Image: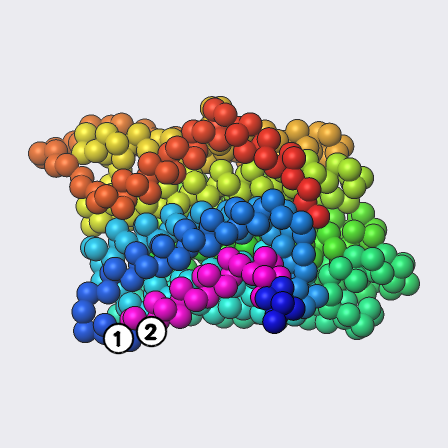
Amino acid sequence: MANLDMLHQHYWVTMGPMIVVTITAFVVMILEFIFRDKDRRWLLGVSLVGILVALGVAIKHYTLTPQITLNAVVTDAFSSVFSVLILITAVLVLLFSFEYTGRVKLAAEHSYLLLFAIVGALAMASAVDLVTLYVGLELLSIASYVLVAVRRTNVRSVEGGLKYLIMGSIGSGILLYGMSFIYGISGTTNLLTLGNEGPQLWSQYPAIVLLSFLLMLAGMGFKLSLVPFHMWTPDAYDGAPAPISSFLATLSKTASFGMLLRMLLFIFNGAASHMFYWAGILAAITMVIGNFIALPQRNMKRMLAFSSVAQAGYILVPFALFGNSPYYDWVGLFDSISLYLFAYTFMTVGAFAVVYLVSKDKNTMDSDALIGLVQRSPWLAGALTVFLLSLAGMPLTAGFIGKFYIFTNTIHMHTAWLGIVLFATSVVSFYYYFGWIRKVFQKEPVGEVTHLPAGGAMHTLLGLCVAGTLVLGLVPGSLLNVLMNTKWF
């Protein structure tokens, strides 16, 4: 009995947040079937409680000694940091969904589909086996395909879901194909084993290892909306319900970046450094094309979609630097990736929330709907301004701190050309971000000014996002001190 209790405690330590969210998902699913004929918006409240409990467990596990279960799932600082970020994002998305479903009726299934997607994301952050990572990715992906198309009577929603399904399936196939080469030459799918034994094999099969690297990078490129694998992104974001668009732009990308980081560093850390140069090229192309395609966009959700493409390019920059840096410099790269993901989450979810309220009020997605927002709601106008300034990378915001640390890393690692591309494309982004800000502070051309209402959940969401964006911009040490003292592995 004592051994059984120890085993249960061991599973709880390594998979506690996943267990809590999984149980919550099944409870919500059962409740949805029981109360089928009633208003089930309160199920989002049940989901939120479960996520908050899981968040508390993840924060507690951050201080524990690393442990591994079934040689496939691990609890370490890496998994804890990414799990905390994923669960914080989930809280924001659920608050968004609560506000959204009060105005737009969605199938009740979306609440537990969101939870199952979060379970997949947590698995991607914690797994150290290629099979487990892939299962987590597919759980997240399949739930996301359905969530994008959850408005079955909306043509754009169904079209976006179908495009996402097709492109996501192609990406999954390419990723799996790349994994198969690694298994073929090593005989294992365990990342810990590959990290120890892989370097001896890579010198024997350099061409196969390079091909596997490129295939896995391309497969994850579909999930991360990296150019040229981004073509599904604007249609999926535009067609999906607004909370799901923010979910795809933030939580899904956070989990995918965490998975990519695990795979590249465990599998390829002893391989030739020039392979990571390909990640730099992909990052540069993504930053340039993402920003330039965003320039002419008038549809607000499509502009945010292309903006998220460019932001993914910024986050990918540190990945290209691992090949140029010794092991003791990796901590700084982990810190810059994590910091930017935290900043990106707050400013992106907040921007999608304000865009939703404005578009619903004006019944249009055209950016001209922003004209006079400061008169209709000074609070929303101020919040959107903070998010846009942060996305542009203006000082005193989280976005600036995140980009600054990435830029300094490129200089320190002697990859200044990537830092120059990052800086130049950020300047380009000023045009469309400041174009929105200009419209926000214009006066309404004609007609009576009406107040733009927002519910309590939305005010809470925006308050958290504004606070996160400003605190990380004004007092970045509040998070950086934690990250710098983190023993990542």
Bin the neighbour count of mark 2 within 10 Å (Cα to Cα): few under 14, some 14-19, many 20 and up.
few
> Which region of the structure is painted magenta?
8-32
Q: Is residue 413 magenta?
A: no
Q: Position of residue 270 (x, y in %)?
A: 83, 52
Query: Which of 151/227 is in front?
Result: 151
Looking at the figure, which quarter contains the N terminus? bottom right
Q: Is residue 367 left or right of residue 121?
A: left
Query: Which of 157/193 is in front?
Result: 193
Please tell me which residue is depicted at 35% across the width and 31% down the height of the picture. 385
- Which label was assigned to residue 217? none
Q: Is residue 232 above or below residue 460?
A: below
Q: Are marks 1 and 2 in contact (CB under 8 Å)?
A: yes
* Disc 1/disc 2 C-alpha distance (Å): 6 Å
Element type where label 1 sits in the image? helix
Dominant SS of magenta comes to helix
> Which residue was labeled with disc 2?
30
Residue type marked 2: Ile
For this orientation, the residue located farthest to the front is 1
Q: Is residue 93 above or below residue 474?
A: below
Q: Position of residue 2 (x, y in %)?
A: 63, 67
For this orientation, the residue located farthest to the left is 448
Q: Position of residue 459 (x, y in %)?
A: 27, 40
Please tell me which residue is depicted at 67% across the width and 52% down the height of the picture. 66
Please tell me which residue is depicted at 46% across the width and 66% down the height of the picture. 22
Query: Which of 465/405 is in front?
Result: 465
Q: Is residue 52 left or right of residue 63?
A: left
Residue type marked 1: Ile
> Which residue was labeled with disc 1?
34
Element type where label 2 sits in the image? helix
